Image (cartoon, rainbow, N blue to C red):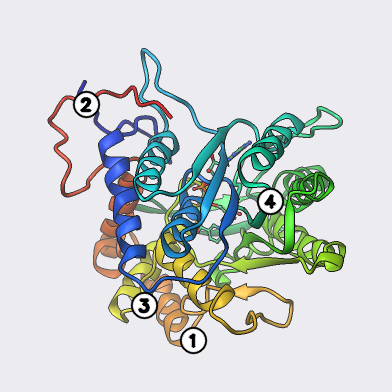
Amino acid sequence: MMIQPKIRGFICTTAHPAGCAANVYEQIEYVKSQPAVEGPKRVLVIGASTGYGLASRIAAAFSANAATLGVFFEKPSSDQRTATAGWYNTAAFEKKAREAGLYAKSINGDAFSDAIKQETIDTIKKDLGQVDLVVYSLASPRRAHPKTGETFTSVLKPIGKTYQNKTVNFHSGEVTTVTLEPATDEEIQQTVNVMGGEDWSMWMHALRDAGVLADGIVTLAYSYIGPEVTKAVYRDGTIGRAKDDLEATAHTLTREMREFGGKAYVSVNKAVVTQSSSAIPVVPLYISLLFNVMKEKGLHEGCIEQMYRLFADRLYGGHDVVADEQGRIRMDDYEMRDDVQDIVSSLWQKVETANLEALSDIKGYRSEFLKLFGFGLADVDYEEDVDPNVSL
Ligand code: NAD
């Protein structure tokens, strides 16, 4: 069949297997073009199929020759539908990893469940013995608690007062004002239950108790801070509360793993286009302006450049890990530079539908969005019939 993008809001309901593969190969080639990293050799990535988790997996495998085990929640193709992008990404990653002689296996299912944790532990025991790095890169709107069975839903809302700001429909280019009502206490708590540190902690406890964490284990989770304009909806909003909890969890985990030299870090990554970030109000407009400024200054990075730099420079660069006063690794250093933020905030004041194309990189945003689903890649013939049925 011929596969074309079918967009519904901030989701594309189709994905192109050859396009997703080309996107993954591009990331692999980037890493291979950089100096090798003396890094971890056995890596577990939870949330490994798209965005920052996929880029972490690629960076570990192709810069440090690591064996990787990936956990994610993706769907294979069916009669009516293509597989999800993360499914095709993983098939492409595993193919290239195996061609390079690297171990690569994947577990598809609900990472919040006890069953998937157990399956992961059994696989590590059987195939790898232990792991040296655990990357926790889940982004999910829901979580079923493995002990109580209760399902929590996260919301992207401000806390305390109504928030109004500009936002963009990145497909049509229409800039409008969005009004977001404050979250209730229950919504704040549910968001923390989904995106906070409890599940990361459960993973690390289960792995530790099963004896599959190597001495000197490093575990990483990802956070975001961002600028003043998104503060009310992001860092000071419900998701920010969850990130506070995630960051506090890093300190607790480091204390708990002290006896075998373990360290837990939160890396604050820069804003990039992923399936998750495109769902946050206000953020896509900010990213479109940011991309314009960062490209202009030669500072632009996507997931793979960020994750390679995290490995090569911050974690395994042969020096102590550089962290801020709260112990966080700051991969958002270029994004948060004053000279970048000053221009972005002055553009923010002026941006509207009529000047969007001139002031922002909305075109770049759109093409990055389509690329997430394997569309718009130069070397892929989208007129050609392609088999959507790809096995893992
Ligand atoms: P993403 O949507 O691209 O990836 C999410 C991953 O989680 C996928 O692999 C998906 O399969 C997996 N997943 C979701 N629910 C799951 C479940 N129940 N069981 C197993 N796997 C599941 O998201 P992303 O933007 O790469 O986000 C990853 C992390 O990076 C998040 O903590 C996010 O807050 C953080 N971060 C993102 C940005 C950004 O701009 N996108 C910036 C800084 C930090």
Where in the figure is residue 129, as x and y percent of width and height?
A: 68, 47
Q: Which residue is mark 3?
A: 299
> Could you give the CA–CA distance between mark 3 and mark 2, rounded to whole angstroms?
36 Å
The answer to whether the residue labelled 1 contacts the one labelled 4, judged by CB atoms less than 8 Å apart, is no
The mark closer to the camera, 3 or 2, is 2
Name the mark nearer the viewer: 1 or 2. Answer: 2
Disc 2 and disc 4: Cα gap in Å?
39 Å
Residue where numbered disc 1 is placed: 338
Q: Which residue is mark 4?
A: 130
Q: Is residue 221 left or right of residue 361?
A: right
| Distance in Å between CA atoms under marks 1 and 2 | 47 Å
Q: Are marks 1 and 2 in contact (CB under 8 Å)?
A: no
Q: Amino acid at mark 4?
A: Gln
Indicate which disc, 1 or 3, sits on the residue closer to the N terminus: 3
Q: Amino acid at mark 1?
A: Asp
Q: Position of residue 115 (x, y in %)?
A: 73, 29
How many numbered circles does the render carry?
Answer: 4
- Check disc 2 and report its element: helix, strand or loop: loop
Under 8 Å from ligand 1: the CB of mark 1?
no
In this rendering, the label closer to the viewer, 2 or 4? 4
Mark 2 vs ligand 1: CB below 8 Å = no
Three-letter code, disc 2? Val
Q: Quadrant of residue 363?
A: bottom left
Distance of label 4 from label 3 (alpha carbons): 37 Å
Marks 3/2 in contact by CB < 8 Å: the verdict is: no
358 versus 192 height, above or below: below
Q: CA distance from mark 1 to mark 4?
A: 43 Å
Rounded to the nearest angstrom, the CA distance separating label 1 from label 3 is: 13 Å
Q: Is residue 67 left or right of residue 162?
A: left
Residue type at mark 3 is Leu
For marks 1 and 2, the one nearer the N-term is 1
